[in-house]
Image (cartoon, coloured by chain):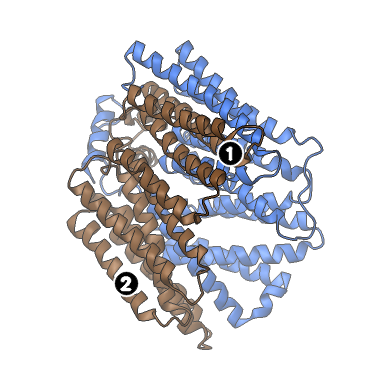
Amino acid sequence: MHAKTWDNGGHVVIDDRQRVFDWIERGALAQRDFRQALSIAGVTPGRDEWRRFLMLLAIGTGAALLATGIVYFVAFNWHDMSRFAKFALVEAAIVAAVAACVVRGVDSIAGICALCAAAILTGALLALVGQTYQTGADTYELFAVWALAILPWALAGRQPVLWLMVLVIVNLATQAYFDDRHVFFFSTGDADIWMLFFLNAAALALWEGLRDAGVGGFSATWALRTVAVASGVAATFVGVFATIGTHEASGAFAAAWLAWLGAIVLAFRVRRIDVFVLAGAVLSVVVVVAALLGKHFIGSGMVVAPLLVAAAVVGIATGGGIWLKSLAQREP
Amino acid sequence: MDTQAQLLWSKLAGAGLVTGPMPPGEDAAIPWYLRALVGVSAWIAAIFVLSSVAAVAYRIFDNAVLSVITGAALCVAAAVAMRRAPDGPFVSQFAMAIAIAGQVLLATGLLHAARPHDVLGWLSIAGMEVVMALAIADATHRTLAALFAMAALYASGWQSYAGSLLPVIAAVLFTAAALGADSSARAHALMRPGSAGVAVSLLLYVPVATLLADVPLRGAAHPLPAPWLQPALLAVVFVAAGALMLRRAHVENGYTRGVAMASAFVLAAAAWPVPGLLAALLVTIVSFAMGRRALVGLGLLAAVAMLGYYYFSLQTTLLVKSMSLIVTGAILLTCGLALAHRGALTGGARDA
């Protein structure tokens, strides 16, 4: 396959394929030659890519199914099996997974999958402890301890997927903490919204900083973009909350959302260019502005008000699109 | 024009496929996430356009004829605007919002007009979406139109046995459209975005059907008299697609083909009780073959979600679920490690 087909931008594949067809449409390339042209462009995987992909799919899916199966088994709470046998089963599976990682090497597909399986099984082990000894721990405590327990593997493994697992579990712990205290969205408390916003924004800032510093495990663009999506969703919630409802904290919400927006532009436009993250920021602006204008204009009784809001939404998306497209040409 | 295009042009020239200087002026293709931005924004704008129509004359929504006429007028206006100003980004995006609003109005009118024959109404909507996909040559719009067409098809089958077979039809449609997209430039412009819409509908089928099953609706989904038929047919499509992909990739090594097909059979058998898992894996593999990274990611994400959903499904006990997952996982791991071992022996891929 063409060396650039699977680069971090994710759009190179589309570009080369699209170019071939564009040139055919313009008559610069003969229709009968398009298969050969696609082959030269390298937009379809070759033999080695297929083998690697199938290997990843089989090992990854296999490890995921094995780990999930053991989690389900623990959840079944089979009374015919002694508690010691249950602990032995889960602990043996964790040891086997870690041993497989050590044998295969943490940078190999098998090693990464084994370490991820071990991380999932650690959660099962903690759940088994709670189930067996009725520790009375809250759900958020289980998640928090789980995140802490797999942290050394994330540090040692230096794999983005492990760090993403840690982030997901910390998010779940945060959500569970507030759920346990019966603080839900649209209730009097805004603490959960703030916490998720700050948590994911801090995660994105930290990830970007570690990526810049060249720390292993943080260089993959797809992983940073995944964190950016989490941060963007939380920030957009904050932005929408600033515009609708009767929150006393509307001003603080608005300031936080604007600060997040400024930080995104600074990090992903001024310091370096990442069009994907900036596209997310533009989408956030579209959603928040639509909510703001919708609230103020639709209740005004003006018949054309919704059309004006639609035009504003399209205007922002169009302007943002032109800006991002020009940046995409310069994206390394 | 960027250097990558120049590099590709040079390679094609070196192979004797093109001559002379590279055609000037064309832009690089728009990344998928910019198309997603346009699509979501157009949807939001369409909601406000519909609000505007309702503010002018809310009775339009209650009258089949008025809905159809207004919707058709909006669709025609949008199609004309997009044809006349294909390079005017504001006009074309606003036209897309108008087109979506028009399609919602048309769909409302068609459903009203078809009552009490709901199936006919939904089938008409699916047909209308196909016409819109052909009429408006915009990739984002074609993806959305394909998604709406499939949603209407699913809805048409909701109260019949045919509904249970629609995921199978969607799987066949997706595979055919994804592969057919490379047959010519014209097919590429139509089928590439269309196949993306069908893929998303396929991935959304199980969660939406599950959600709808919990909501009291008129009528209910009719499961097939033979509940094994749908997963069995999906398994056939999956294995056939796997074989087709290997052929297209010119994987001639018998060992690799054998292990890959064995994995496909195991996956097809294992995914039997997990709703949606096989469809997600089909989208993943076909998308990989076509070099569509975003759909590969979406397929994998859906596969993980389906495994999570399996925990809550009430078809069987957790003990049976866990045993089936553990056995299948072990077999798949063996297949994967066999491929890795073979690679190490032949000096193929670095990894193990």
Residue B243, position as x, y percentages in the image: 55, 22
Instruction: Name the chain under label 2.
Output: A
Residue found 29% across the figure and 59% down from its top: A202
Label 1 near label 2: C-beta < 8 Å? no
Instruction: Name the chain under label 1.
Output: A
Q: Closest to the observer: A149 or B173?
A: A149
Q: Tag 2: residue type?
A: Ala
User: How would you rate the neighbour count of disc 1 (Cα within 10 Å): few for under 14, some for 14-19, many for 20 or more?
Assistant: many
Q: Is residue B7 above or below residue B90?
A: above
For the residues marked 2 and 1, what is the alpha-carbon distance in whole angstroms?
A: 41 Å
User: How would you rate the neighbour count of disc 2 (Cα within 10 Å): few for under 14, some for 14-19, many for 20 or more?
Assistant: some
Residue A229, position as x, y percentages in the image: 38, 55
Which tag is nearer the camera, tag 2 or tag 1?
A: 1
User: Secondary structure beneath disc 1?
Assistant: helix
Determine the image quadrant of residue B35.
bottom left
In the figure, is residue B13 to the left or right of A60? left
Q: Colour of chain B?
A: blue
Q: Which residue is labeled 1 in the image?
A: A72
Chain in brown in the render: A
Residue found 42% across the figure and 50% down from its top: A169
Residue A256 - label: 2
Residue A312, position as x, y percentages in the image: 40, 74
